[in-house]
Image (spheres, grey):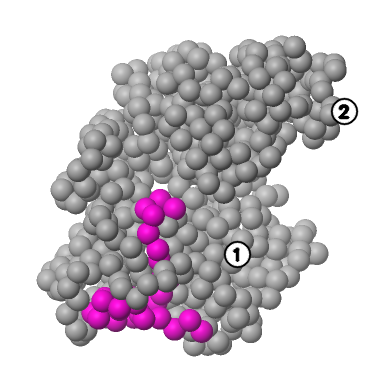
Amino acid sequence: MSPTIDSVITGTRITSGEATAAVLKLDAPVSFWGGIGPEGTIIDVHHPQHGATVTGRVLVMRTGRGSSSGTYVLAELIRLGLAPAGIILTEPDGIIATGALVAAELYGTQVPIAVVSAGDYDRIEDGESVTITMDGDTAFIASQ
Amino acid sequence: MTLTLTPEEQAMLAGEHGPAVALSMRIVTEIGRIRGATQLVDIDSVHIDGCIFYGQAGLDYAQKMVELGGRVAVPTTVNVGSVDLIHPTLVLQNTDREKWVAQGGRDLMQAYVDLGCRQTWTCAPYQMDSRPEVGRHIAWAESNAIVFANSVLGARTDRYGDFVDLAAAITGKAPAGGLHLDEHRYGDVVLDCTSLSAETLALDVTYPVLGYLAGAIAGVSNPVFVGLPADVSEDDLKAIGAAAASSGGVALFHVVGRTPEAPTLEVALGPNTDAPVHHITAQRLNAARQELSTARVDRLDAVSLGTPHASVDEIEQAHDAIVDSAPLADGVAFYISTGRSVFAECERRGLIAPLEEWGVTFVLDTCTYVTSILRPGTRAVMTNSGKWAHYAPGNLGIDVVLATLEECVASATTGRITWNRELFT
């Protein structure tokens, strides 16, 4: 039986917000710039989940990747309502954080970003529904 | 670890210096918190990479800063935009998307001008007057500018990117983290080039290939080159850095005996005395160049020089190679991308007219790999830039050959791609 979140995972808040959505767990990090298209799908043809849609999902991947212009791509997806509902990583990523921070300032839409340990990362399963909440600088991730 | 602000910085955050400063300060302090910085540093200059149009959000951000009365607090240069403001018809506007980018790109560039930026529109701000000094803190964006400032000038900038660059310019502040700090500036992987021949070390194309290998080997760490000539040119160092920041995430490299933080290998490595050593051989260089050169056809459609933007010396070298050559072949386009100030200096020296007469198209304010300039139907392009060779196939859907200036010019006169695959010895 594959592991699921049987108790609440605690992590670190990168950006504020709350989200409840199904997990899209990536087998490899994706670059927002050049990797995710304007409709919110993975367009990087070398990516194992090429064609998957990030819109409305809790995007789970180990790290960020790629050009700093990824900030623009994420902010634009948030503006258009095509962004992930939340993002979970194992390392802080300035590019992804900046895109979410700026979009929150410009459009008032918050996309919560949390960092969890590698061990907890392995417990999050693709497709399951999770809720991300924040308290201070602590993030909580609970399965539904 | 928490971020501690000075009373002045707290006042900026609280809005006492206006809403644009407060918004910018929220972004700078949040990024500082995320990166684990304990304080902010005052910066001398900013280079902004946010002026290429990727969509409405980038424009909304810059225009919001304008509406809030924002103004850059330190000297601020701007990177290339999406249009050549001096040659507006050069960027194609045939499709709806091209028209949207051209209009959005123009509006975005105007917003940065309204915020008080110098209209430099170049990815090589280090080719201008008033360069940052050794040891001074700056906040530069654009990967090639970052790596050049850190490595060749010895100034200190972390990897800044879109949005944060403008926030740093409006506040004059950056988080004191990453490459602002001594402990992150030592080399941690050695690239031994002592086996390369003098002929190889004298070739222009050696340096972008070295940079490409360095990025692949070093990733985001700091490579140290041993065995390069003590008088290796700034253009060659520019080529190393631009390629290393494309194939990897290199933001600082050292060249022993040449760059300011590497008088000796020991000084460059500091505490990292057990750094791994990689031997860079001619075979590895030849293999790397062949890997970057994707073109499998003979017919040449275009040559593109000047990524990063060509310097005065590089335009002079192109001039010298071209004036005595045969005419440009029919059907071949020949582009040189450069900045306004370098172009003006070259005009003053009489280098531009003969090149334009021969058939060179100068691209200012932008670059041939970020916007629609190449003619539709272009398939194979030669370049002497490792960065262009790395990005153009993906961005533009074309094939490329990474070659010397001489090979580019010779091929442009025949319309046939000719290059020595085993050039390096």
Which-is-in-front pick, marks 1 and 2? 2
Compared with B83, B389 (above or below) is: below
**B111 left or right of B287?**
left
Q: State the SS at label 1.
A: helix
Q: Magenta span has B141?
A: no
The residue at which mark 2 appears reads as A1
Residue at 68 percent of width and 57 percent of height: B186
Question: Where does the image place residue B256, in percent across and percent down from the top left?
Answer: 61, 71
Task: Please state which of residues B137 and A96 is positioned toward the viewer in this rendering.
Answer: A96
Quadrant location of the N terminus of chain B? top right
Q: State the SS at label 2.
A: loop
- Cα separation between marks 1 and 2: 44 Å
Task: Please state which of residues A100 and B365 is positioned toward the viewer in this rendering.
Answer: A100
The residue at which mark 1 appears reads as B214
Residue at 37 percent of width and 53 percent of height: B396
Residue at 15 percent of width and 48 percent of height: B89
- The total of numbered circles placed on residues is 2
Is residue B17 visible in this depiction of the protein? no
Q: Which residue of the protein is positioned furthest toward the front in this rendering?
A: A1
Determine the chain carrying the residue at label 1: B
Is residue B217 visible in this depiction of the protein? yes
Q: Amino acid at mark 2?
A: Met
Range covered by the magenta-colored residues: B394-422
Instruction: Tell me the quarter of the picture where residue A49 sits.
Output: top right
Q: Amino acid at mark 1?
A: Ala
